Image (spheres, grey):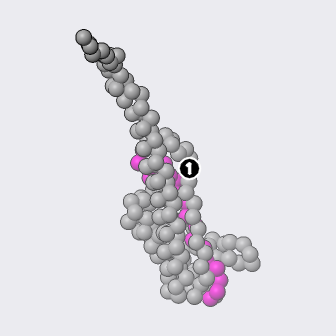
Amino acid sequence: MFRPVIRTRPRRRGAAVVEMAVITPVLLMFIFGIIEFGRFIMIGQMSVNATREGDRYAVQADSTPTQVKAVAKQYLAGAGVPDTAISTLVLEQQLAGTWVAITDDDMALKSIPAGTAVRLRMQIDYDKVTWLPRGLFIAQTSKISSATVMRKE
């Protein structure tokens, strides 16, 4: 008579739990890293867009440096970047090949001749806009810099 051979599986009680316990922290770190680097790139693009908007406003005939900086800050505020995160916001003009800061008086931009290069330069402290604990994936001292140059109209 033929007797079927019954094979029993080796007991693996708790093996799935142990595997999950080992893999979950690695998986979470990977996911949080993707989120953090995506945020870094997003804030970088937002700062470029803010300098572009501010510089576009600066090259108009009737703008002031204070208004230009307010336009850039307002753009960033719409993206969730607070004013306290902006460490540098400088409006400059090019004179004889060098960049010279424009003062905050009302007549500063009106006196610049047409065709002169005007630059808005910005630097953001990344540790003030991160969503994760500081220094986990990106160094605490990381700064995002952007600048835009346009010709005065």
Q: Residue furthest top?
A: 1
Residue 144 x %, y %: 55, 57
What's under tag 1, amino acid-wise?
Answer: Ser
Residues rendered magenta in the picture: 114-132
Position of 139 relative to 49 (above/below): above
In this view, the residue in front, 68 or 111, is 68
Determine the image quadrant of residue 22. Answer: top left
Q: Nearer the viewer, residue 21 or 54?
A: 21
- Specify whether residue 104 is in view: yes
Residue 134 in view? no
Say whether residue 103 is left or right of residue 16: right
Considering only vertical position in the picture, is 73 above or below 58?
A: above
Kindly indicate the quadrant of the structure image that contains residue 146.
bottom right
Rate crowding at label 1 as few (under 14), some (14 to 19) or many (20 or more) other CA atoms within 10 Å: few
Q: Residue at label 1?
A: 142
Q: Is residue 131 above or below residue 73?
A: above
Q: Does residue 53 sit above or below 125 in this rendering?
A: below
Give the image location of residue 34, x and y in percent. Answer: 46, 48
Q: Residue at x 67, y 72 (%)?
A: 100
Q: Position of residue 7 (x, y in %)?
A: 31, 16
SS assignment at label 1: loop
- Say whether residue 116 is magenta: yes
Relative depth, front residue between 67 and 55: 55
- Quarter containing the C terminus: bottom right
Which residue, as the protein is rendered here, is positioned at the far right? 96
Q: Is residue 122 magenta?
A: yes
